[in-house]
Image: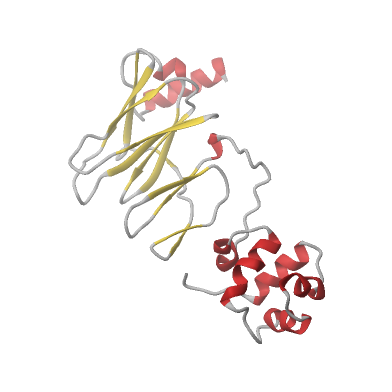
């Protein structure tokens, strides 16, 4: 970790839990003056107290240290709320179904924000029996490549890891798929909504004016 727990964080958590300094001190077996010192920046909790402090507030040590306590209202968040995190150091890909505090190689990661596909990141989706065959028109060199592709439905995620000098292609089971994501190591995350009326039949449709028109028509007809 590149930071330590702050007094402001301890105070925020304590007040959120409607707890006095004395009550927190009692739970941690320290005196209330000690808690006061933490909150005013005149001292720091001993490292041995980090786990007990996190436990009292019902969060992880990582959340405590990051200063970002996650509150997932819907613990059983469906897959359409998925977030993707990509480490800039090792290009490791991590996934969560809701808010999370994620670190990799000492870096605090933020979820990648998906953009609409463009002329440099065209995607072709074709229905083949009960699968979507997905092809991304993109170079696959060691310096510039698509790292992964994923298909999301409310109850599942299908993810395919892609590698430089391979093909930017993937197959996904059609059932329930509503959105497809893919990640370019230079330009970030892209996504496209899946429309069964367009993508579920043979023949590829890319991110072009034609597809845009078809998507608008499908939205009016099928919602």
Note whether 160 is above or below 83 in the view shown. above
Question: Which quadrant of the view contains residue 119?
Answer: top left
- Kindly identify the residue that appears in the image at 47 percent across and 48 percent down: 113
Q: Where is 3 relative to 55, above or below?
A: below
Q: In the image, what residue occupies the spot 67% across and 74% down? A: 8
Whether 41 is drawn above or below 18: the answer is: below
- In percent of width and height, residue 116 lies at 43, 39
Q: Position of residue 76 (x, y in %)?
A: 62, 38
Residue 208 in the figure: left or right of residue 178? left
| Residue that protrudes farthest toward the bottom in the picture | 42
Q: Position of residue 103 (x, y in %)?
A: 46, 60
Side of 72 relative to 145 (left or right): right
User: Dividing the picture into quarters, in which one does residue 192 lie?
Assistant: top left
- Place of residue 171 in the rendered image (x, y in percent of width and height, measured from the top left): 33, 25
Which residue is outermost to the front?
A: 29
Residue in view at x 35 percent, y 58 percent: 88
Compared to 106, does 117 lie above or below?
A: above
Q: Which quadrant holds the C terminus?
A: top right
Report the colour scheme: secondary structure
Say left or right for 5 vs 181: right
Given residues 218 and 22, the one toward you in this image is 22
Q: Nearer the viewer, residue 35 or 182?
A: 35
Tell me how many marks there are. Answer: 0
């Amino acid at each position: 970790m590149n930071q330590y727990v702050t007094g402001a964080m301890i105070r925020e958590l304590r007040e959120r839990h409607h707890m006095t300094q004395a009550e927190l001190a009692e739970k941690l077996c320290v005196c209330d003056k000690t808690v006061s010192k933490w909150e005013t920046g005149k001292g720091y909790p001993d490292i041995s107290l980090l786990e007990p402090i996190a436990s009292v507030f019902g969060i992880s040590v990582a959340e405590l240290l990051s200063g970002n306590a996650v509150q997932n209202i819907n613990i059983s968040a469906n897959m359409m709320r998925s977030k993707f995190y990509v480490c800039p150091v090792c290009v490791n890909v991590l996934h969560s179904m809701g808010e999370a505090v994620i670190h990799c190689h000492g870096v605090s990661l933020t979820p990648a924000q998906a953009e609409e596909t463009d002329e440099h990141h065209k995607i072709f989706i074709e229905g083949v029996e009960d699968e979507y065959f997905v092809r991304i028109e993109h170079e696959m060199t060691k310096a510039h490549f698509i790292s992964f592709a994923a298909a999301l439905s409310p109850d599942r995620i299908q993810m395919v890891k892609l590698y430089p000098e391979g093909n930017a292609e993937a197959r996904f089971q059609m059932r329930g798929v509503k959105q497809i994501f893919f990640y370019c190591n230079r330009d970030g995350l892209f996504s496209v909504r899946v429309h069964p009326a367009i993508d579920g039949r043979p023949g590829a449709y890319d991110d072009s004016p034609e597809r845009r028109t078809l998507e608008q028509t499908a939205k009016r007809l099928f919602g």
